[in-house]
Image (tube, rainbow, N blue to C red):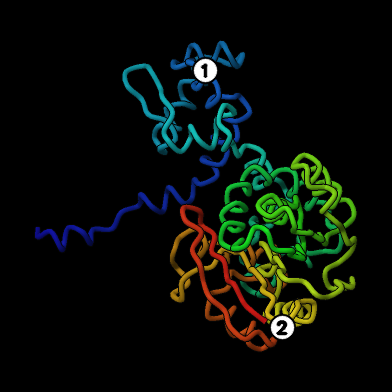
Amino acid sequence: MSQSSASQVPSLELIFESIHGFQRTGAIKAALELDVFTGMAEEAKTAAALAARSHASERGMRILCDYLALIGLLTKTGDRYALTPDSGVFLSKKSPGYMGTAVEFLLSPPQVDPFQDVASAVRSGRGVAGQGVVAPEHPIWVNFARAMAPLMTFPAELLAGLLTTDTGAKVKVLDIAAGHGLYGIAVAKRNPNAEITAVDWPNVLEVALENARAAEISNRFHTIAGSAFDVDFGNGYDLVLLVNFLHHFAPATVENVLRKVWKALAKGGRTAILEFIPNEDRVSPRVPAAFSMMMLVTTPGGNAYTFAEYERMLRAAGFASSELHDLAPTYFRAVLARK
């Protein structure tokens, strides 16, 4: 058999791995609950040592660690396990990059339950549960603000670095759907003359204010409580941040938000849109492209929009120019548009 024909031999491997994807979810969740990755960072390298540390059975721990090695989150040599670069940075509490709180949020019922009936979302083209997570004052956003903050610190710094050109200039910044507030805070930390105004629901703004106080910029951190669609932003802003917000909505709604942003900006002001932005083929890069499925199932009309789509919406809202920036090594991209 030639190499070309051999490569065409059907295999069930991908299908079975996809069907059993819930096992990966369960294994990672269990490993975080049992502190497996942190235990390894503290030199517990065998199933016996990890089991003793977590008050678990040795048999159960061995099977869990073997599975984690199988899927690439651990390595195994003899009876000893070790962290990989990925699990060491993101899944051990010893690391500043620990994202366990984000995993808890991403595996919460509002995020997971709708995927029990994806077919309904495909049939209707809308979220499985009505408005889904975009319902007014949905309690999920307080959890989001607290859980996702550790994962957003690095991209917030990258975006602030892209945006901050003159660290001494007076800058008036509006952070829409600010959540944890870290993106506006990152700009304020780079520029001592930046004034930040954060918009979000009142209970979510409490989290942003906590983070502003911790960053020692609370005297320059102001809030507007309420829906971004309803409140008066004011005007004269030099910069408006739209971070992980527009993907929740259909194009017509996105354009309405962008028109409101355009009016709030000073002449020559900029807006920064940070999102999962796939290539025009919509199947690459993998993580940004896959985000469209999340939006299909959990929102009425959201999407992972391409840069070309953002360009069209920004132009329709009145913006003069727009440009795309990769925020490597993260999966995020930023669209910068000028009034």
Q: Nearer the viewer, mark 1 or mark 2?
A: 1
Mark 1, Cα crowd under 10 Å, few <14 / some 14-19 / many 20+, is: few
Residue position marked by numbered label 1 in the rendering: 42
| Quadrant of image for the C terminus | bottom right
Q: Secondary structure at mark 2?
A: helix
Residue sitting nearer the eye, 80 or 10: 80
Q: Position of residue 3 (x, y in %)?
A: 12, 59
Residue sitting nearer the eye, 224 or 105: 224
- Position of 112 compared to 281: left or right? right
In the displayed orientation, state which residue is furthest to the front.
168
Q: Are the residues tagged 1 and 2 within 8 Å (C-beta)?
A: no
Q: Is residue 173 above or below residue 85?
A: below
Q: Position of residue 164 (x, y in %)?
A: 61, 61
- The amino acid sitting under disc 1 is Glu
Q: Residue at x 75, y 52 (%)?
A: 181
Q: Earlier in the sequence, mark 1 or mark 2?
A: 1
Q: For the residues marked 1 and 2, what is the alpha-carbon distance in whole angstroms?
A: 52 Å
Quadrant assignment, res 107: top right
Q: Which label belongs to residue 77?
A: none
Quadrant assignment, res 168: bottom right
Mark 2, Cα crowd under 10 Å, few <14 / some 14-19 / many 20+, is: few
Residue position marked by numbered label 2 in the rendering: 252
